Image: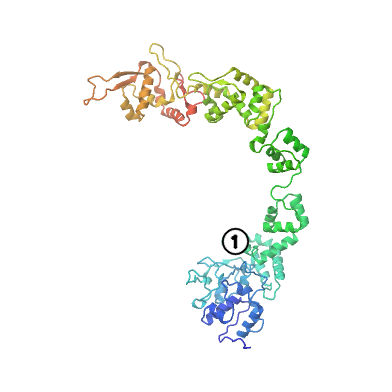
Amino acid sequence: MSQPRTLAIRLLPEPGESIDSWLEALARRSWTPLSSLLDALSLPTPERTSPLLTGLPAPLLRVLEEQLALPAGHLDQSVFSPGIFSHRSAPHWRFCPTCLHQSQGRSPIRWWLPWTFACTEHQTLLQSLCPRCLKPPREFLPRPVHLHPPGHCMRRSTERTVCGADLTTAVPIPLVPSHAVLETQKSLDIIRVDRKANPDSVFTAVEKELAQRARSLPDDLEAMSSAARDVWSHMLRSATSAATEFGAWRIKKVGQEILTLDFLRQEYEESGRPLHEIADGLSVPRAFVIQRAKDLGVPIYRGTRPVAFDDEWLKDQYINRVRSAEDIGAEVGVCGGVVLRRLERLDIPRRPFGVQSSTELNRKLDESAPRDIRAAVEGTLGGWLRLRRFQIHMQFPTLLGTAHYLGVAPGRLAMQFGRLEEATGAELFHRSVRHEPQRPTARGTSLLNDLDGPNVQQLMRNDLGPQIEALPDQASIDAAIALADGERAALTTLDPHTPPPTRVRIPPPILPLLQYLVEHADQVTYSAQIRARTEIPFTTIYKQLKHFEEAGWLTSRRETAHERRPRGGRGRTYYTLSPAARLLPLRSLIDDPGKLRKWTAAWDGKADTAMGQRLELAGQTTPKGHS
């Protein structure tokens, strides 16, 4: 059998140098691509660099040593034990820019270790990203190394080019002398990590060293710059990640030493802490804690834990008191589904699904309760709410006043009162009409008397609780009465033969036209002129002018023959304030535009609360409760 052929050009690896760094230097010395050199040495050409550090078998290393005339076992110091790293999570290469410059691109094997954070010689943190492309420089196997100087980023930028950034020019991240990270790194550098090292022994030594320094490391973080703190935190997370062999070993150790059967029974079963909370507290994956609990025979609860029910109490609440499963579950701290499953085990028939099983719908009042009260509450939802709102409604003159007080849409209130009358089987109140407030019928008066009873009031408060709506005060009622006429309120009629009234009703929609008429009280005007100056629609102007004239606020006359326009056309009608209207002190309101704007804006933005406002002309104030 022929002996392996030795290479003509040889280059010895530096002490502690990684095999990928040595092969790259040998390729540059031979002026050949790294992939071609690997083929010549019968070595695999992996896509990533890390398999060269962990995937070369011992016989292949012996052949390589023979080809390069190296002593047997010399390359064992340039590779790792196969158990330290795996292909599922490739190690990250870090570098010190100053060391890389001094060694002309040769890098030690320790720069591949996840617990190598700092350069103790130059007192800086190691870096893991290229300063130009911001990616790991040696993650993938470099190919045309002979075309680029040593110490440059060989990561591909396109299909045919590489980044080529000079890694030695990266800005160092200095640490203060005697920093805790530097002291820790010196202790970690002593740990042997070559091919002959036992991975379990290596991980144990690293974990012991990190545990001893764990308390001093956070205290010295303030001595770092913000950039150094970010780099340090990133490296510490990557070193302890569960995706690495070392991180998985640490989790397994935690599971063996901390996650014992007694610990899980105390924390999970007795204290009731969820497994995900235990996992977060120990900084381990949740799946590992769950699997550990299964291995130890600890029962795993999916969702809400079982609750010990008093079966007799449960039967009484569900059957006799007709409470829903949701109500019972809320009292004992579980969801309604847990209560229903317990009822099934007790062979208790379940009520119809959905709202039909609710407590409110199935509640029965005592026979001593008035007939209309029982009819309004039993077998329905929201009965007490409708009764309370009816009690409030009968204190207001109109539905709009009640709606404004309760903050509810008028249509919704009308629907609720309709359902109340349907439940009692009688009309409960006469609806309001123009200038006449609403009033209860004989049946409605009887219902109001029943609602005032102390027993009924107590039942209502027990059902509605703190959300019960308060009865209106007198100020709210007075304000609603002042606004009772609404948008179609009648304008106060002025009689020229009687003294001017002290109180005048002016519907808000006609206020803009009234303002114009008062401002031009000494002039005659006509509809086209009003339209041009106020932009009020013609249809509105015609209706409101007629409204003012019928109420005695305006006088009108037709256009005379000598006033007719040269080209003819329809004759104009001229308007001016009547003598009775001139006696009213309207000028004070017109002289205060702010008050008028606020009044009309209240009408435009909230018609249900500003309709039919009444102006107190004697004192020149707006109705009580309105601005």
State the SS at label 1.
Answer: helix
Task: Residue 388 in the image: state x and y as whole percent.
Answer: 61, 26
**Horizontal and vertical percent for residue 217?**
66, 62
Residue designated by label 1: 229
Q: How many marks?
A: 1
- Outermost bottom residue: 2
Task: Write down the quadrant of residue 103 in the picture.
Answer: bottom right
Residue 336 quadrant: top right
Residue 627 is at least partly visible in this image: no
Q: Nearer the viewer, residue 60 or 469?
A: 60
Q: Amino acid at mark 1?
A: Arg
Name which residue lies at 66% across and 80% down: 59
User: The N terminus appears in which quarter of the rendering?
Assistant: bottom right
252 displayed left or right of 40: right
Quarter location, residue 581: top left
Q: Is residue 570 above or below residue 130?
A: above
* In this view, 103 is above or below 421: below
